[in-house]
Image: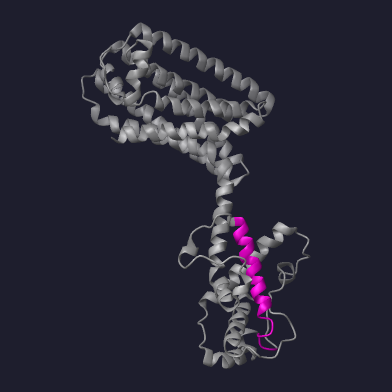
């Protein structure tokens, strides 16, 4: 059951990664590392797909050779191991050096693959029908097949040792955060596949000595499947990780602004371009998050301007806590004294560059990020303030206008 679930998941993830990177390959056809990466994803998905229990017998019958999916799966693993080496070589070395090293590795793994194909048909493993997870273990009792399997496992182990070495090296020199995280994940996945190889070595030795090694089988498949998943994750996360991180940051900012936005919206409903969803449905990530976050910032600023007549005269501004108290006082004054005299300055928070003493030349996106960060701090401080009762709003306004003593040494 666990084997089937992991095999289906690995097949799906590998083929999904291939489809995900295919548009980029079509744009960068001259990139050998990207070609190798796509071959890796395709072979990773196929190595699990063609050996699924519900499919493997049909594939074998199609070619008229029982257990042929075992060879096809192992061939795909050898090819993806070589492709992984090519990717890491191109990422870790200058182009001229990388091309020579990649060519050498491709030739070595091609020779190993040719030897495995010949040996498979020379050894001619048992022809009885067996499940994908049981075929190798049952055939392992045959001395010739055990020798063939040792060669296959050794080819995989040599490739994963190279993957651990190169990905570990590249993780240290990679400058981008997500690329570095991806390389560490590839290193972890390759290490698990080395454990997978070590388990198979132990099973081969134990079986040849007459021991029942079936208890090791779940650990073998688990290490191989999880290792493959980690490697696909590591190879793809540099592409989708930054976008996901940006969306999570935007959603976190959207939620942080929520208390302040709701208070301003309830006081000045006209600031909203569209009616908001009912609480707590507004906690769900909205469609068009970037647009919604921009709208929330604009509507908060519009709300602050709408409160212009209500902040108490002489109120100081500066810290997020000061801004939050000022807005709380303005909201309470609006609820209890809508005809209060206008102040000498607007209620809207000053631009981020002015607040921080900057020049304001960082560009629109930088200014917006600063605005979001500032308003998030104000919203956090605002959420901690108790809402004053309408009857106490005038006294609250007077307290906000009074000097704060120890708050400003």
Image quadrant assignment for residue 269:
bottom right
Residue 59 horizontal side relative to residue 395, left or right: left
Give whichever of 278, 225 is nearer the camera: 278
Image quadrant assignment for residue 347:
bottom right
Magenta-drawn stretch contains 308: yes
Q: Is residue 103 above or below residue 368?
A: above
Q: Position of residue 139 (x, y in %)?
A: 28, 16
Q: Position of residue 402 (x, y in %)?
A: 64, 91
Tell me which residue sits at (61%, 56%) in the image. 290
The main secondary structure of the magenta stretch is helix
Q: Is residue 9 above or below residue 365?
A: above
Give whichever of 13, 97 is nearer the camera: 13
Give whichever of 28, 271 is nearer the camera: 271
Q: Position of residue 59 (x, y in %)?
A: 37, 18
Magenta-drawn stretch contains 125: no
Tell me which residue sits at (41%, 30%) in the image. 194
Residue 396 horizontal side relative to residue 27, left or right: left
Say if residue 191 shows up in the picture: no
Residue 173 horizontal side relative to residue 152, left or right: right
Tell me which residue sits at (52%, 23%) in the image. 82
Image quadrant assignment for residue 362:
bottom right
In what quadrant of the picture does the C terminus appear? bottom right
**Which span is picked out in magenta?**
290-313
Say if residue 394 shows up in the picture: yes
Q: Is residue 60 above or below residue 21?
A: above
Give whichever of 394, 340 is nearer the camera: 340
Q: Position of residue 186 (x, y in %)?
A: 50, 36
In what quadrant of the picture does the N terminus appear? top left
């Amino acid at each position: 059951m666990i084997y089937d679930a992991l095999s289906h998941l690995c097949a799906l993830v590998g083929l999904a990664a291939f489809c995900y990177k295919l548009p980029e390959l079509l744009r960068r056809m001259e990139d050998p590392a990207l070609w190798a990466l796509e071959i890796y994803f395709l072979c990773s998905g196929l190595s699990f797909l063609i050996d699924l229990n519900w499919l493997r017998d049909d594939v074998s019958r199609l070619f008229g050779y029982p257990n042929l999916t075992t060879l096809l799966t192992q061939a795909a693993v050898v090819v993806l191991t070589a492709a992984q080496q090519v990717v890491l070589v191109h990422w870790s070395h200058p182009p001229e050096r990388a091309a020579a090293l990649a060519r050498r590795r491709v030739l070595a793994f091609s020779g190993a693959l040719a030897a495995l194909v010949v040996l498979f048909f020379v050894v001619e493993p048992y022809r009885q029908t067996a499940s994908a997870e049981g075929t190798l273990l049952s055939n392992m009792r045959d001395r010739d097949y055990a020798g063939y399997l040792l060669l296959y496992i050794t080819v995989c182990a040599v490739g994963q040792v190279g993957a651990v070495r190169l990905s570990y090296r590249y993780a240290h020199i990679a400058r981008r955060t997500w690329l570095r995280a991806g390389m560490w994940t590839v290193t972890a996945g390759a290490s698990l596949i080395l454990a997978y190889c070590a388990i198979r070595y132990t099973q081969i030795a134990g079986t040849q000595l007459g021991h029942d090694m079936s208890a090791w089988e779940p650990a073998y498949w688990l290490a191989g499947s999880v290792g493959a998943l980690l490697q696909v994750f590591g190879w793809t996360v540099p592409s989708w990780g930054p976008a996901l991180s940006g969306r999570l940051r935007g959603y976190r900012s959207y939620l942080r602004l929520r208390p302040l936005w709701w208070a301003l919206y309830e006081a000045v409903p006209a600031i909203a371009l569209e009616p908001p969803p009912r609480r707590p449905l507004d906690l769900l990530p909205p469609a068009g998050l970037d647009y919604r976050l921009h709208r929330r910032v604009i509507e908060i600023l519009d709300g602050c301007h709408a409160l212009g007549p209500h902040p108490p005269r002489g109120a100081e501004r500066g810290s997020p806590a000061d801004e939050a108290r000022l807005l709380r006082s303005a909201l309470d004054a609006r609820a209890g004294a809508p005809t209060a005299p206008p102040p000498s300055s607007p209620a809207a928070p000053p631009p981020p560059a002015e607040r921080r003493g900057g020049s304001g030349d960082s560009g629109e996106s930088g200014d917006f990020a600063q605005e979001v960060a500032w308003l998030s701090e104000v919203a956090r401080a605002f959420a901690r303030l108790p809402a004053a009762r309408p009857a106490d709003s005038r006294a609250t306004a007077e307290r906000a206008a009074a000097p704060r003593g120890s708050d400003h040494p």
